[in-house]
Image: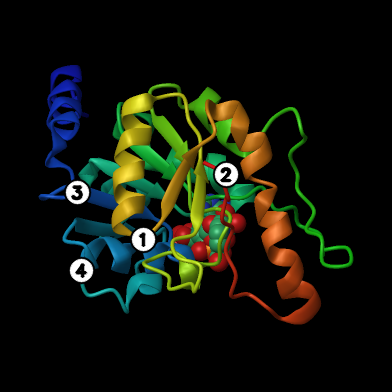
Amino acid sequence: MICEREIHAKTAAESEGNIGMATKVGVIGSGSVGKTLAAGFAKHGYDVMMGSREAGKLADWKGKKGSFAESAAFADVVVFAVKGASAEAAAALCGDGNLRGKTVIDTTNPIAEAPPEKGVLKFFTTFDESLMERLQKHFPAARFVKAFNSVGSASMVNPEFKAGAPTMFICGNDGGAKAQVREILTKFGWETEDMGGAEAARAIEPLCMLWCIPGFLRNDWTHAFKLLKKT
Ligand SMILES: NC(=O)c1ccc[n+]([C@@H]2O[C@H](COP(=O)([O-])OP(=O)(O)OC[C@H]3O[C@@H](n4cnc5c(N)ncnc54)[C@H](OP(=O)(O)O)[C@@H]3O)[C@@H](O)[C@H]2O)c1
């Protein structure tokens, strides 16, 4: 269990710009997102531990590995990359105390257990409550930031596009956590657009639906979003 003083010490160190020096990243998830981001953080010099409920799923990962709880306890920054329908259960397995005070990068999408309709995914959430809001409500001491949910895993780390850096839309209630995620995204080759508080996840999560349509209809999974501005 991490005490409040340690949390504040970490937060202060992070706000002084020490992020990335030896920041410990706990990746919760053994799927393509977890594996891609774990490799991306390792490439950028972070100290990474991957977490899974089944050790065998992390056989290819040569670095530190453990359970969800061990990975979350290890982390200064948690990357939450689990199946959307199991997100609350997975966060509970991480342990409330292990998430307390930490930035949690929430990559999840609330994809329902139903096939897409003409390429359009079905979600189990509504326009009035996103998955990240549910997670934030159940784990109020964690500092959730939505990110990486609206692009395929193959383009998450330093993607190369002719038009330059793509845009990652983020949101969350904690400004310090969002600043941390912005710094990470810059290292990972992204422009960041902060859309505000956790409620903005109601709009950011469905970007996944839009992103997947060309994939389901035309097997085109190689794009990313970019926000164009006049000024
Ligand atoms: N795939 C992409 O390109 C992509 C892109 C953007 C966002 N996303 C989102 O990112 C998240 C991860 O996607 P993914 O494709 O990497 O993998 P995924 O297949 O959606 O999720 C795999 C992870 O979910 C965990 N999980 C499954 N059922 C669980 C349960 N009942 N309780 C606890 N944990 C459970 C698994 O844990 P174990 O390791 O213990 O099996 C595994 O770590 C999803 O929410 C997805 O919508 C995916």
Label 2 sits on a secondary structure element that is loop
Residue lying at 27% horizontally and 48% vertically, measured from the top left:
70
Label 1 sits on a secondary structure element that is loop
Q: Is residue 99 visible?
A: no
Q: Do the residues labelled 3 and 1 touch (CB within 8 Å)?
A: no
Calculate the distance from the C-alpha at mark 3 to the C-alpha at mark 2.
38 Å
Q: Nearer the viewer, mark 3 or mark 4?
A: 3
* Residue 218 circle label: none
Number of numbered discs: 4
Q: Which comes before the other along the chain, label 1 or label 2?
A: 1
Q: Identify which amino acid the numbered label 2 is placed on.
A: Lys
Q: Where is residue 231 in the image (x, y as percent from the top left)?
A: 51, 41
Q: Quadrant of residue 221?
A: bottom right
Residue lying at 30% horizontally and 69% vertically, measured from the top left:
39
Give the residue at mark 4. Answer: 63
Q: Is residue 79 visible?
A: yes
**Left or right, residue 119 beside residue 148:** right
Q: Identify which amino acid the numbered label 4 is placed on.
A: Gly
Q: Where is residue 8 in the image (x, y as percent from the top left)?
A: 18, 21
Q: Which comes before the other along the chain, label 2 or label 4?
A: 4
